Image (spheres, rainbow, N blue to C red):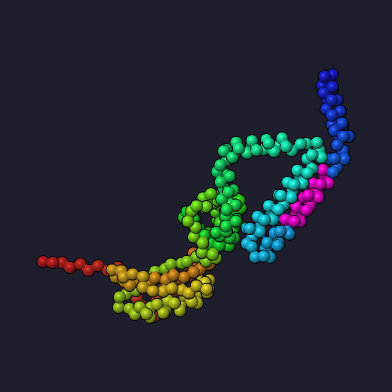
Amino acid sequence: MEQEIEQVTEIYNLIATYLVTYSFQILGAVIIMSIGVFIARKTGNFVFDFAEKRGLDITLSRFFGSFTKIAIITSALVISLPKLGIQITPFIAAIGALSLGAGLAIQGLLSNYGAGLSIILTRPFVVGDTIRVQGIWGVVKEVTLAYTVLTNEDEEKITIPNRHIIGEIIHNSQEDTVLELSVGIEYRSDTNKARQAISEALSRVDGLSTQRPVQVGIESFGDSSINIGIRCWVATQRFQELRFTCNQVLLDALQSEQIAIPFPQREVRLLQ
């Protein structure tokens, strides 16, 4: 019991001596850190607003703002630690040694961060763009250093690690997605009349891009029909909805012009 009391007394004396010796330094360190955090917050927000006003996309603006905050807080921490009697040189050496081992252990995570930094700096796509990569497609909702978040018409949240994006072929169609349709008409039908009817009908559909015209033409010649191909650009968040709408509009337009859509036919002859 006496030994435990002596240990507690010794610890108390050490703490009391430390507080007496470094009381003003502790106060100075707290003040420096408080000022550093305050300046970091204000400066980070200023950099973010400035980048947005200069026309930079939201991802790059957030990166610059966050990087500024971290840099200022780190600088304040480096200044504050010696005030507490803590030398940062051994920490720097230890961090360097640990970084080598940690880098080998978390190569996948580091590769994601490296790829994320490349995406942020080179900007192959920005928030709001529609991208396709490795068979996955959707609207870019958020880009971080570790992953990119996509969303689609079903409000699914698709998270892709950035290392699976960099080095792959990326299709970026900005805000819209191409919608390809096809319909067959009889060989005896007037193709020009059919194309005109389809173009006029689709021009009245709400949600199709006004910057990219609808393309309508003969796609192929089938066994029992001339296949008319249609390409139009639609809002990605309404892709399936507009696909159904356009199909109904195509059917109504052809029926109103009395243009028949043939069904497959086969002629069988019985030889004697």
**Magenta stretch: includes residue 34:** yes
Residue 89 on image: x %, y %: 73, 37
Tell me the magenta residue range. Answer: 29-44
Quadrant position of the C terminus in the picture: bottom left
Residue 39 in view, yes or no: yes
Residue 84 on image: x %, y %: 81, 38
Quadrant position of the N terminus in the picture: top right
> Looking at the image, is 22 positioned above or below residue 254?
above
> Looking at the image, is 251 positioned above or below residue 71?
below
Dominant secondary structure of the residues highlighted in magenta in the image: helix
Residue 128 on image: x %, y %: 58, 62
The residue under the point 42% across, 68% down is 181
Query: Which residue is outermost to the left?
Result: 272
Query: Which residue is outermost to the top?
Result: 2
Residue 140 in view, yes or no: no
Q: Which of 43 and 13 is in front in this view?
A: 43
Count how many numbered circles sit on residues in the image.
Answer: 0
Would residue 244 appear left or right of 186 to someone viewing this image?
right
Toward which corner of the image does residue 80 lie, by quadrant?
top right
The residue under the point 80% across, 36% down is 85
Residue 236 on image: x %, y %: 52, 64
Toward which corner of the image does residue 102 lie, by quadrant?
top right
**Magenta stretch: includes residue 133:** no
The residue under the point 60% across, 37% down is 100
The residue under the point 49% across, 57% down is 170
Q: Nearer the viewer, residue 62 or 218?
A: 62
